[in-house]
Image (tube, rainbow, N blue to C red):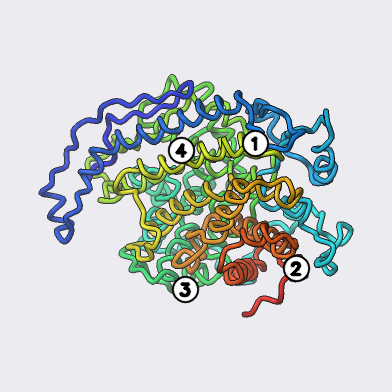
Amino acid sequence: MPGPPSGLEVRLRDKRVKLAEPEKLAATKTSHVACAKATEFSVYTWKENLPASLSLIFNRLKRIETKISQLSNHGKRPSDAPKNAPATIPAVQTSPVGDAAQFLSPPHFVEIHRAISTVGSPYGDAKLSFSTRQVIHWPGIHPTKTSGSFPSATEGADTCLTETELDGSAFPEDVENESFPDDWLATLSLSTVKGLSNAYFNTFNRIFPFIDRDFYFLNTLSTVVGEGFNYSIESCLVLNVMALGCLGANAFEEGGYHNQDAFPVVGVTQTLMSQDVPGKGLFNEARRRIGLCSGAKDIQVSQYYLTAALFYSQAMCPVDQWLMTDRASTNSLIFWSHLRNSSEEWEADMQSRVFWSSLLMETVIVQELDLPRSRLRELEDIVPLPKFLPYPNTKKPQSARRDDSYYHYHFLAQIAHRILLGHIRDEMYHLNPSTLVANELRHQLNQWHTNLPPALQFDSDQNHFSSPAEAVAVSLLQTRHRSAVYHPGRPFLYKALANPASVTDQDLKFCSEALQTASNWPIATGTCKNMSSFSPLKYFMCRSFFGTLLISHALKHSGDDRLVKTLPEQSEAACTYMLNYIDELALMSPSIRKDRDLLSSIYKPVES
């Protein structure tokens, strides 16, 4: 089955969207009936209607920008802010150079909070950090009557967890003392190499599709098969793909799914699959080789670094993940700044996939850990969205699988949602949030959800999936929607804890809605929780849950009935779930261990 319509061209230039009419799909309904006779749902129907749906989604995002600008320029109504609050929301600096400086450093939180009520305060409507872990520095999080056992700043509550990650031990190069023969890579059978590669493409590459399956099998892998594992970029990339394939194959087993590309798990392969991070031996072999070919500007170098970033995300090493993403970003910047005009259409489309994958990964990391950004954001309005063109030099595309385009559009939905979250961060994360802006953002979120293509519409109660990739893709879409409800509410939660007397009923409504969605994130529950080997956001789920647990505890012990009533009915059960989630992953990360230890001082020990 062909990929997405080749005529589909979605561009974001000067915040405008241009959509070309798609070409007629070459596939026929006859072939569809033959492969999916049991269902009346037509994949082709939603694909043909998809450009219009995507147009609606991205035009909604344009409306957000226009509407929010109007609301910001109008200023807040008297009911939206305290009496001495500034009348308007200042323009947000969007240059990546200034991003890190916009967010308040922890020691200044209390000082700025006190200055808000002062007429003429230079802090006025200062920015609030988007990092969920920074909740620990909010006023009201340490209520005097109930936090006697909570560690003081000198005991570690003020510790910057980014520094904890930076000071942590390097990712080990040993293979847990298992002895491999010198030529152990040569002992891997071709069926094992292909099986691990397919496991990668059927899991991780469907969420972040920055490698083309056809090119990989016909060029990258065939080069390695012919020359053996040497010090070429092809060898490094294949080793990383196989390492992630170990994790992907594990995910099939963890989720109880049938793996049609299963391979014999014996000997060295069995050892690789049973490591603390499955595939670590393969990953370390790639690390030993990459230094000799990392200077190349080939797209495979970028792909190597992105696969390394994905592996580090599974190992819960966020700073290493950021470093790999940053290196991939550098190569991408070189291409889009200097080489795009001399490239073939397919190559440019692949570079687009790399660009947007890098940007999506980077955004999550730098916002949570307050790490420096790359310059990718400067090219957002220049780089087109990927069209997922098929590799031209093949007669029988291996990537033409029935559901490939389904995951491609999930990827585009991630990009659209990232833009929406960017508006939420830029316009809402002030110490005096506007209910006017929050209401408009909520309206636009509802429109985004309503206008998703039919095949991307999701059932909030869906818990049965056909594969690990479908489980993660759908759960990510659901989680993105709920996070866009949660994040606009956090500035109101800050306001409620910092100055309870100033909050309005509308403020409390946003607090309540945020708390309703703060723990019920499908990517961290059900099938996805069981598939720990295929959970790229698990570190950031822990960080988010940490902030939510602190907020819930502070509200519960605030002594203000209005604040207590914002907690969900099942708050105790939700807190227990979040504590267990953090506890199960604490051994993998020094910073998550610190969070767990801090939480244990205000919550009862987590029951195993």
Mark nearer the viewer, 1 or 3? 1
- Whether pointer 1 and pointer 3 mark residues with C-beta atoms closer than 8 Å, the reply is no
- Characterize the local packing of mark 4: few (<14), some (14-19) or many (20 or more) Cα atoms within 10 angstroms: some
Q: CA distance from mark 4 to mark 2?
A: 39 Å
* Residue holding disc 1: 373
Decide which of tag 4 and tag 2 comes sooner along the chain.
4
Mark nearer the viewer, 3 or 2? 2
Residue 131: image tag: none
Where the C terminus falls, by quadrant?
bottom right
Element under label 3?
A: loop
Element under label 4?
A: helix
- Characterize the local packing of mark 3: few (<14), some (14-19) or many (20 or more) Cα atoms within 10 angstroms: few
In this rendering, is residue 66 above or below 566? above
* Residue holding disc 4: 444
Q: CA distance from mark 3 to mark 2?
A: 39 Å
Residue 267: image tag: 3
Q: Quadrant of residue 158?
A: bottom right
Q: CA distance from mark 4 to mark 3?
A: 54 Å
Q: CA distance from mark 1 to mark 4?
A: 27 Å
Decide which of tag 1 and tag 3 comes sooner along the chain.
3
* 100 left or right of 263 in image: right
**Residue type highlighted by circle 2:** Asp
Q: Is residue 412 shown to the viewer in this render?
A: no
Decide which of tag 1 and tag 4 comes sooner along the chain.
1
* Residue holding disc 2: 597
- Characterize the local packing of mark 1: few (<14), some (14-19) or many (20 or more) Cα atoms within 10 angstroms: many
Mark nearer the viewer, 1 or 4? 4
